């Protein structure tokens, strides 16, 4: 069983974000906030394409060298966990082996590191952590959260998940969270309870299939349209 006792730095690419969140060009043109982006290359690659993305994560309190050291300290551990649990993953679409997975993830993280200093000076990388973010109400059109809520269900608990989702709704018109599986590759027990909680506050919640899956069965995201709570 895949287990981690804490959140680890693990970066995904622009193309993966597009597929994980079902992002057409018109959505990429919105004001986007990536919550818990870590060392993903989405911000760097989106900026290069002319889009406006802000990323927030507590790892951005550290400098470039410190983040690189944290990546190096966890990289082999994550790959070994994947190797032991290879049957829980979908191999293909450019990632056929654990070795290829490591290469793809490291390429994304190197792209992030190359962009990090300039992006931090420009205000694109903000040191902040859910469930309390330093942004104005409605500051963004779209909040994306990849591999954080639901994935770390055991480590974070239901109260955190509810607060994090409400906080993203506070700052964005729409929220998308992927995946809905916990690390152990079963659906998080908080998906239904959080959805019901959001609906109770006047939000519109949908579970949608997306054209991406790496965890077996992990091809769904939660989409929340964030109307004002009544």
Image: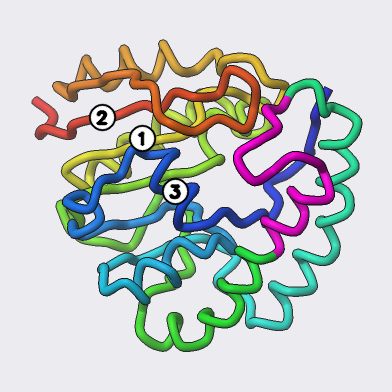
The disc, 1 or 3, on the residue closer to the chain's N-terminal end is 3
- Gap in Å between the C-alphas at discs 2 and 3? 17 Å
Tag 1: Cα neighbours inside 10 Å, few (<14), some, or many (≥20)? Answer: many
> Disc 1 vs disc 2: which is toward the camera?
2
Give the residue displayed 55% in from the left and 40% down from the top.
147
Give the residue displayed 58% in from the left and 17% down from the top.
217
Residue 96 part of the magenta segment: yes
Q: Are marks 1 and 2 in contact (CB under 8 Å)?
A: yes
Residue 211 position by quadrant: top left
Q: Position of residue 15 (x, y in %)?
A: 46, 52
Q: Which residue is mark 3?
A: 17
Identify the image quadrant of the C terminus.
top left
State the SS at label 3: helix
Give the answer, above or below, for where 134 lies relative to 191.
below
Horizontally, is 99 left or right of 27 in the view?
A: right
Horizontally, is 12 left or right of 206 in the view?
A: right
Q: Position of residue 40 (x, y in %)?
A: 55, 60
State the SS at label 1: helix
- Gap in Å between the C-alphas at discs 1 and 3? 19 Å
Horizontally, is 79 left or right of 132 in the view?
A: right
> Disc 2 vs disc 3: which is toward the camera?
3
Q: Position of residue 28 (x, y in %)?
A: 25, 55
Q: Which residue is mark 2?
A: 224
State the SS at label 2: strand
User: Which is more toward the observer, 127 or 19?
Assistant: 19
> Disc 1 vs disc 3: which is toward the camera?
3
User: Which is more toward the observer, 46 or 92?
Assistant: 92
The boundaries of the magenta stretch are: 89-106
Which of the numbered marks, if any, corresponds to residue 99? none
Q: Which residue is mark 1?
A: 165
């Amino acid at each position: 069983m895949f287990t981690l006792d804490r959140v680890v730095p693990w970066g995904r690419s622009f193309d993966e974000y597009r597929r994980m969140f079902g992002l057409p060009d018109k959505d990429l043109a919105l004001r986007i906030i990536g919550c818990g982006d870590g060392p993903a290359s989405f911000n760097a690659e989106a900026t290069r394409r002319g889009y406006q993305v802000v990323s927030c994560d507590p790892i951005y309190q550290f400098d470039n060298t410190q983040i690189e050291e944290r990546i190096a300290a966890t990289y082999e551990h994550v790959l070994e966990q994947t190797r032991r649990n290879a049957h829980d993953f979908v191999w293909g679409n450019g990632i056929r082996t654990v070795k290829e997975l490591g290469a793809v993830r490291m390429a994304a993280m190197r792209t992030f590191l190359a962009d990090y200093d300039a992006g931090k000076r420009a205000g694109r990388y903000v040191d902040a952590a859910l469930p309390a973010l330093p942004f104005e109400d409605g500051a963004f059109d779209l909040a994306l959260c990849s591999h954080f809520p639901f994935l770390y269900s055991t480590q974070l608990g239901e109260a955190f998940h509810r607060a994090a989702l409400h906080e993203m709704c506070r700052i964005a018109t729409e929220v998308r969270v992927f995946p809905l599986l916990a690390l152990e590759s079963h659906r998080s027990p908080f998906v239904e309870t959080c959805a019901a909680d959001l609906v109770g506050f006047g939000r519109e919640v949908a579970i949608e299939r997306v054209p991406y899956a790496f965890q077996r069965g992990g091809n769904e995201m939660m989409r929340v349209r964030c109307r004002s709570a009544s």
